[in-house]
């Protein structure tokens, strides 16, 4: 599900429209924090697409959750 970009950043391989996978991953993530409401894109409250550690890329998003 992830492509390592460097030691502190990984890119989601599901792109910008794999709603189910993004929700499933976020449900299992102990670091999930909801982003500001105006920055949320998914209907599911808990989704990587709605996480404050998500940064959009050209093809998908990167997870910048501190380790």
Image (cartoon, rainbow, N blue to C red):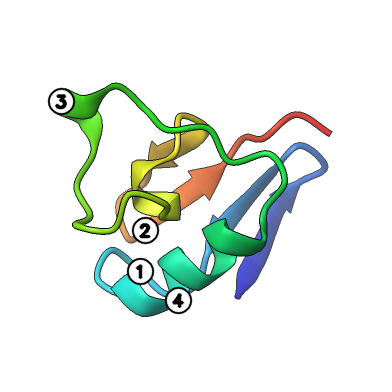
In the image, which is nearer the foreground, mark 3 or mark 2?
3
Task: Say few, some or many: other residues with alpha carbon within 10 Å of mark 4 (under 14 / 14 to 19 / 20 or more).
Answer: some
SS state under label 1: loop
Mark 1–mark 2 distance (CA, rounded to whole Å): 4 Å
Kindly identify the residue that appears in the image at 44 percent across and 66 percent down: 22
Give the quadrant of residue 63: top right
**67 to 3, vertically: above or below:** above
Mark 1–mark 3 distance (CA, rounded to whole Å): 21 Å
Kindly identify the residue that appears in the image at 51 percent across and 72 percent down: 24
Direction from residue 9 to residue 13 in the image, left or right: left
Q: Mark 4 points at which residue?
A: 21
CB atoms of marks 4 and 1 within 8 Å: no
Kindly identify the residue that appears in the image at 67 percent across and 35 percent down: 65
Pinpoint residue 23: horizontal percent, then vertical percent.
43, 65
Q: Mark 1 points at which residue?
A: 15
In the image, which is nearer the foreground, mark 2 or mark 4?
4
Mark 2–mark 4 distance (CA, rounded to whole Å): 13 Å
**62 to 33, vertically: above or below:** below
CB atoms of marks 1 and 2 within 8 Å: yes
Kindly identify the residue that appears in the image at 75 percent across and 29 percent down: 66
**49 to 54, vertically: above or below:** below
Q: Which of marks 1 and 3 is nearer the N terminus?
A: 1
Q: Which of marks 3 and 2 is nearer the N terminus?
A: 3
Q: Which of marks 1 and 2 is nearer the N terminus?
A: 1
SS state under label 2: loop
Q: Name the residue under label 2.
A: 60
In the image, which is nearer the foreground, mark 1 or mark 3?
3
* Tag of residue 38: 3
Quarter placement of the N terminus = bottom right
Quarter placement of the C terminus = top right
Direction from residue 26 to residue 52 in the image, left or right: left
């Amino acid at each position: 599900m992830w492509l390592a970009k460097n030691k502190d950043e990984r890119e989601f391989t599901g792109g910008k429209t794999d709603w189910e996978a993004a929700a499933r991953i976020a449900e299992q993530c102990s670091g999930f924090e909801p982003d500001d409401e105006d920055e949320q894109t998914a209907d599911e409250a808990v989704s990587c697409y709605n996480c404050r550690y998500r940064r959009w890329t050209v093809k998908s998003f990167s997870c910048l959750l501190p380790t």
